[in-house]
Amino acid sequence: MARPLWTGAITFGLVSVPVAMYSATHDHEVSFHQFEKGTEDRIRYRRVNERTGKEVDFDDIVKGADGVMLDQEELDSVAPGRSRSLDIHRFVELAEIDPLYYQKTYWLGPGSDETAKVYGLLRDAMADSGRAAIGTLVMRGKEYLTAIRADGKLLVLQTMYFADEVRDPAEQIDSLPQRNKAKPAEMHMAQQLIDSMSGPWKPADYRDTYTDRVKKLIKAKSKGKKVKAAEPAPDPTAASDLFEILRKSVEAASKSRATSKPKKTAKPAKATKPKKSRKAA
């Protein structure tokens, strides 16, 4: 069994629900090392005192800001509840939360067998109400805004960005695109394309094909083989060709959907027993 990343209690009102946090996701990209070009010599990084040039042990390193040095005990002393409390501030409609604010997902399990009943009560009450709990949590020297929701038998916690951590698009993009005055036929065709490509959300339908190709490249190169390069990105669609490109896209999507549907095979006829003649009877 995995060890919890954090243990503490969800608190709201006078209620305290002990929980344990576990990571719900993991990355599967290829882990690369760094080498000096033309050699197989690994590149290593060291913690060096910039004044003396000498390497410093990790235990001798402290944090500081603006010339003020702080050790971990001092940082923990100002953490709410000594980093063991997940304080709920408000319950909100789940649909009101903009996915832009979500960071990473964690499972929340009961803190112990003795507290499973209180945990289950909170989970079921949240599931019935359709609301998410917005709270704050201090973990690993950082405070997080969190959203907690019910998901089947468990509570799910998602860390979130604070409002001042979300950038204003007007400050990042030189000119924000305005709503286009598309022709009715183009708009109709665009909606048809969306409809023809619509379907249920099935996470298992999608796979990180780039990582697969990188692994294939490494394996091929280790054997002295070559791998075919991926197709280049398509050229931008010109406004004059928009309707025709949309029409062809709708046709291609419709054909793809038709070929992907399993064909219904006729059921084999049931074998009939031969009738006995009167003489045989």
Image: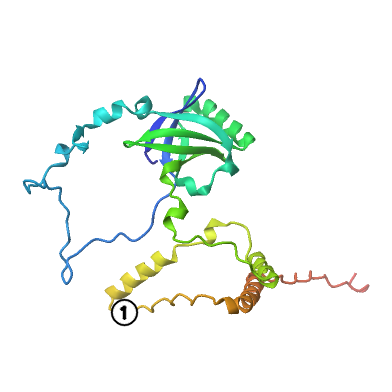
Quick check: can you spot residue 160?
A: no
Quadrant in which the N terminus is drawn: top left
Comparing 36 with 80, the one in front is 80
Relative image position of residue 274 (x, y in whole percent): 84, 73
Relative image position of residue 68 (x, y in whole percent): 20, 33
Which quadrant of the structure image shows residue 267?
bottom right
Comparing 64 with 258, the one in front is 64
Q: Residues within 10 Å of mark 1 (few under 14, many from 20)?
A: few
Number of numbered discs overlaid on the protein picture: 1
- Specify the farthest residue to the top: 14
Relative image position of residue 205 (x, y in whole percent): 54, 61
Quick check: can you spot residue 91?
A: yes
Q: Residue at x 32, y 37 (%)?
A: 140
Whether 169 is drawn above or below 89: the answer is: below
Residue tagged by mark 1?
Answer: 225
Q: Residue at x 54, y 26 (%)?
A: 117
Mark 1: secondary structure: loop
Which quadrant of the structure image shows residue 80?
top left
Relative image position of residue 184 (x, y in whole percent): 70, 69
Q: Residue at x 19, y 64 (%)?
A: 35
Q: Residue at x 28, y 30 (%)?
A: 75
- Specify the farthest residue to the right: 278
Quadrant in which the C terminus is drawn: bottom right
Q: Amino acid at mark 1?
A: Lys
Q: Is residue 4 left or right of residue 180?
A: left
- For the rendered model, the colour scheme is rainbow
Comparing 30 with 153, the one in front is 30
